[in-house]
């Protein structure tokens, strides 16, 4: 509920109360212009970029395709060394907007099929083609019999829905690529799971990513992962996916969308949990998979083995951080809710989610509902800076408001869990800056616990002038271990960054 604790506080209370106020329209949930999210076209094409050997045809001006290529397809290729898959555009001009671009679309479909011979072609509509009402479905249906590739239309005009709808529409529609389970396929995939709700394509080959950790745990249980959807999955994997023993969500919100669609159409079971940060969430995730695999005993043995491997170090770190306060940056709703779950359930910390925008309670209802149903109702602090113009996760105003709120607390007992760009005058743990991942599972829980302990212990320890120059170069603003070479970065306390009132300077001065 709203409070008078401080003139800068818009809301301070529990998540359930914020949720209720948002549903009743008693707290503003709209995003200001500077906080807007990507459009529906961008989020739709982000998922599509994770389907291997599929070519996206952007039916619109060339700029839309450029953005998709730079942000997703080209990035995926550079990160993983995978072959570049083109993003094609019909390059709609003023003439096409007036007279229609159906001819150009048909030509693009035939050319892509002949030139690249992809497994699938996906036509993604943009604002231009949606506004003029091009008969895209008719063009696609007529071309279907003339090409070798399978083809699908995704209506994802940016103006026709908020950003979340782009994810949802693709996850619902790619189910149309799938084929009903057969007894033969179900027998072949009886020990296999799908990880659903992935948003990007190929992963970096040199990094132990979170998805790779989930694959390792599934294999450690004696099962296997059939497909990560849509994370570099093939068309053949999509077709066979409904025959897997169970779908396990990666991102709860997005994974639930495709998992529910597959359950409704094919009866594929769904194991739906929050992001597996920490031991409790990981065990819930594994137990849900094991239930449908018939591997409860194997899962139990794996969990005991995994915990035994981290027990000594984890419990030592937990003793140090238990009871401490964690301020969790709230601009990534799903992630901050999962982190709060981990910190409270596994570490015994007090978690306060800072500047969780009221808009998130509407956009992420699935995750909010799940968290509340588990009995966790974290504290939420929202200050005026969150609702002000600017990038609220790294604004000076929000930093000052936070410091004013926690001013009476000892900095040695408080850790800021979020972006190292924010730099409040307390130890910072930036999960995105972890160089030697994973962050999920038992190993991830140990990693995070040690990072918190390191941040609290080393926050005010003097460092050499050379180290200061490397981490905080003169005249170049703030920096982190990410800005260093791999070798130098490995020699620094992992993902731990420190800050001071003098922005851009090391607090050890």
Image (cartoon, rainbow, N blue to C red):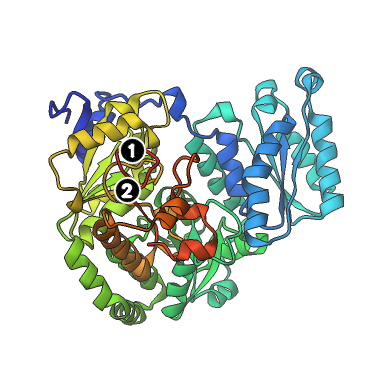
Q: Residue at x 27, y 54 (%)?
A: 459
Spot occupied by residue 413 in the image (x, y as percentages of width and height)? 18, 52
Q: Residue at x 32, y 80 (%)?
A: 309
Residue 173 seen in the figure = no
> For mark 1, what is the residue?
502
Marks 1,2: beta carbons within 8 A: yes
Spot occupied by residue 129 in the image (x, y as percentages of width and height)? 70, 27
Of residues 173 and 199, the one nearer the viewer is 199
> For mark 2, what is the residue?
509
The quarter holding residue 361 reads top left
* Vertical relation: 292 (above or below) 147: below
100 sits left or right of 122 in the view: right
The quarter holding residue 180 reads bottom right
Of residues 307 and 45, the one nearer the viewer is 307
Q: Residue at x 64, y 51 (%)?
A: 75
* Vertical relation: 103 (above or below) 83: above
């Amino acid at each position: 509920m709203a409070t008078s604790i401080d003139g800068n506080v818009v809301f301070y209370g529990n998540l359930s109360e914020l949720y209720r106020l948002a549903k009743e329209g008693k707290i503003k949930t709209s995003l200001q212009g500077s906080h807007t999210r990507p459009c529906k076209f961008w989020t739709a094409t982000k998922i599509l970029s994770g389907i291997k050997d599929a070519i996206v045809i952007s039916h619109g001006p060339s700029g839309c395709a450029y953005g998709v290529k730079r942000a997703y397809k080209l990035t995926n290729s550079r990160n993983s060394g995978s072959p570049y898959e083109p993003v094609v555009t019909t390059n709609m001009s003023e003439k096409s907007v007036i007279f229609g671009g159906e001819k150009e679309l048909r030509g693009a479909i035939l050319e892509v099929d002949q030139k690249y011979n992809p497994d699938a072609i996906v036509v993604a509509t943009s604002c231009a083609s949606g506004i003029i009402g091009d008969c895209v479905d008719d063009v696609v249906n007529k071309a279907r019999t003339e090409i070798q590739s399978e083809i699908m239309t995704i209506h994802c005009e940016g103006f026709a829905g908020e950003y979340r709808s782009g994810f949802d529409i693709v996850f619902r529609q790619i189910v149309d690529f799938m084929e009903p389970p057969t007894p033969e396929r179900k027998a072949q995939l009886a020990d296999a799971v799908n990880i659903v709700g992935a948003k990007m394509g190929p992963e970096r080959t040199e990094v132990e990513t979170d998805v790779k950790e989930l694959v390792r745990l599934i294999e450690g249980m004696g099962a296997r992962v059939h497909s990560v959807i849509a994370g570099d999955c093939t068309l053949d994997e999509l077709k066979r996916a409904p025959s897997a023993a169970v779908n396990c969500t990666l991102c709860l919100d997005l994974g639930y969308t495709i998992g529910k669609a597959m359950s409704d159409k094919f009866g594929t079971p769904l194991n739906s949990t929050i992001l597996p940060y920490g031991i409790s969430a990981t065990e819930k995730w594994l137990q849900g998979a094991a239930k449908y695999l018939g591997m409860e005993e194997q899962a139990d043995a794996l969990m005991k083995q995994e915990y035994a491997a981290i027990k000594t170090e984890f419990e030592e770190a937990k003793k140090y951080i238990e009871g401490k306060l964690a301020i969790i940056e709230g601009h990534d709703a799903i992630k901050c809710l999962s982190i709060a779950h981990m910190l409270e359930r596994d570490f015994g910390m007090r978690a306060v989610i800072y500047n969780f925008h009221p808009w998130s309670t509407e956009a992420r209802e699935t995750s909010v509902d799940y968290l509340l149903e588990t009995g966790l109702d974290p504290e939420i602090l929202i200050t005026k800076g969150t609702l002000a113009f600017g990038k609220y996760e790294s604004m000076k105003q929000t930093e000052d408001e936070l410091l004013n709120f926690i001013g009476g607390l000892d900095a040695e007992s408080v850790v800021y869990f979020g972006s190292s760009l924010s730099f409040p005058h307390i130890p910072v743990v930036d999960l995105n800056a972890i160089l030697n991942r994973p962050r999920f599972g038992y190993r991830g829980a140990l990693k995070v616990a040690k990072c918190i302990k390191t941040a609290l212990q080393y926050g005010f320890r003097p460092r050499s002038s050379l180290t200061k120059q490397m981490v905080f170069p003169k005249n170049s603003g703030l920096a982190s271990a990410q800005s260093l070479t791999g070798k130098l970065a490995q020699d620094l306390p992992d993902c731990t960054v420190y800050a001071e009132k003098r922005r851009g300077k090391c607090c050890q001065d």
